[in-house]
Amino acid sequence: MSLRRLVDEHEGAERALVLANRSQPEQIRALLAGMFAEQSVTVDEAAVEGVPEDTVLLLDGEGEVLAQSPLSAVSESLLFTNSDAFVTGSTSLEETNLPAVITGLEGVQFRLRGYPQSHKEKLLLIAVSRHIERTAWERGAGTHRASFQQLSRIVDEQGTQRVYRRLGESGVDTHVYGVDDDGGAERAAELGVTVHAGESADYRDSWFVVHRPPDAEQPEEPDPLALLAIQGDDGVWDGFFTSDPEQALAVDDYVRREL
């Protein structure tokens, strides 16, 4: 078993986005479509009766509406920002607020190019990672696990350092994983988190963020959250995010047991 196998065995959900009753400029529609141009998520435009202007609808594979969000919320959280906002901390933990049509993309299998092939594709998973981190911090309990490939990133990226210092100071049992480069493990430990360093592919090539609430197996408890992606030799990330307890806890169980 490996983290790569968990990604390969994941059966992606079918989802589509529809921009309903657009009054905003064509450039906004193009930005939304461009965000998912290389993904399995289709983006269409339609006039929909009974829906406010500039609303984004999330549909399942049967065309049923699963969620809807104002276009303005989607724009502010994804279209009008970039990854630097999270890395530098200009978008704070409290300001991370993903609309329902974006969190509703859970289960979709994503294939994302990183820098330098693309400046924008990874933004979705970066925003989802911060969403999971905020959820763990707000709940203030349970376990949170995250990988960074190189542990130095946790302290060298100002925004990331702030987030994990706050998690380390909270009631969340926080664990971070990666290769110990440039004394990264020792510096990360100063944030009050538990550090796991290694050299295997699971440490080098994985991107996971998992929050497990206390007693997560109990039906009345809040759902666990997990993001998992694996980088291939071509620099492309394959992965998904989910709140399905079986899938999310499988990621957490593997990391806890093997890393």
Image: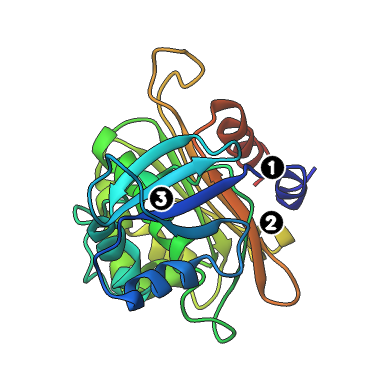
Q: How is the image coloured?
A: rainbow
Contact flag, marks 1 and 2 (Cβ < 8 Å): yes
Q: Residue at x 64, y 65 (%)?
A: 237
Amino acid marked by disc 1: Glu
Q: Residue at x 27, y 43 (%)?
A: 51
Task: First in sequence, mark 1 or 2: give its number.
Answer: 2
Q: Secondary structure at mark 1?
A: helix
Q: CA distance from mark 3 to mark 2?
A: 27 Å
Question: Where, by quadrant of the figure, is residue 54 drawn?
Answer: bottom left
Near-viewer residue (257 or 9): 9
Task: First in sequence, mark 3 or 2: give its number.
Answer: 3
Can residue 200 be seen at all in this image of the molecule? no
> 10 Å neighbourhood of mark 1: few (<14), some, or many (≥20)?
few
Left or right for 79, reference 118: left
Left or right for 111, reference 26: right
Q: Check the image and report above or below for 63 versus 245.
A: below
Contact flag, marks 3 and 2 (Cβ < 8 Å): no
Write down the residue under mark 2: 202
Write down the residue under mark 1: 258
In the rendered image, residue 82, in percent from the top left (x then y), is placed at 35, 75
In the rendered image, residue 91, in percent from the top left (x then y), is placed at 23, 66
Near-viewer residue (161 or 132): 132
Write down the residue under mark 3: 102
Which-is-in-front pick, marks 1 and 2? 2
Q: Check the image and report above or below for 65 versus 38.
A: above
Q: Secondary structure at mark 3?
A: helix
In the rendered image, residue 58, in percent from the top left (x then y), is placed at 44, 45
Amino acid marked by disc 3: Ile
Q: CA distance from mark 3 to mark 1?
A: 31 Å
